Image (cartoon, grey):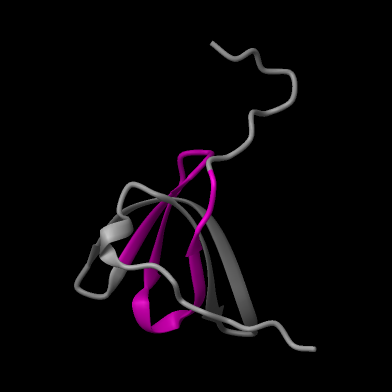
Amino acid sequence: MAARLVIAITSQDIGARITTRRRVPGGFRDAVGILVSWEDGLLKVRKRDGTLVEIQEETLVAAKVVPAAPPRPGRMQQ
């Protein structure tokens, strides 16, 4: 049974944590992070390490809002 790919985010999800899958030459790439902007067909996603990923809307094959990241092991919560 094949997985169903759905784009279930909109510009209304800015500020939410999302996961994305996009087409790139030779396959697919995934990015998980906070959707910081979506303007003129360009999504910007800030990953946990601070990296900003720019994704052209037409390359998206799947995306959805996901829960907040679990705490990293060995880190104390405040």
In the image as oriented, which residue stretches furthest toward the bottom?
A: 1
Please provide percent x and percent y for residue 19: 53, 60
- Describe residue 39's horizontal placement relative to residue 33 as left or right: left
Is residue 49 within the magenta segment? yes
- Main SS of residues in magenta: strand
Of 21 and 64, the residue lying toward us: 64
At 49% across and 69% down in the image, what residue appears?
63
Q: Quadrant of residue 27?
A: bottom right
> The magenta stretch spans which residues?
43-67
In the image as oriented, which residue stretches furthest toward the right?
A: 1
In the image as oriented, which residue stretches furthest toward the left?
A: 40
Please provide percent x and percent y for residue 70: 63, 35
Q: Is residue 43 above or below residue 34?
A: below
Please provide percent x and percent y for residue 21: 55, 71
Please provide percent x and percent y for residue 40: 19, 73
Quadrant assignment for the N terminus: bottom right
- Describe residue 49's horizontal placement relative to residue 34 as left or right: right
Q: Quadrant of residue 56?
A: bottom left
- Describe residue 76's horizontal placement relative to residue 34 as left or right: right
Q: Is residue 59 above or below residue 38?
A: below
Q: Is residue 73 above or below residue 19?
A: above
Of 74 and 6, the residue lying toward us: 6
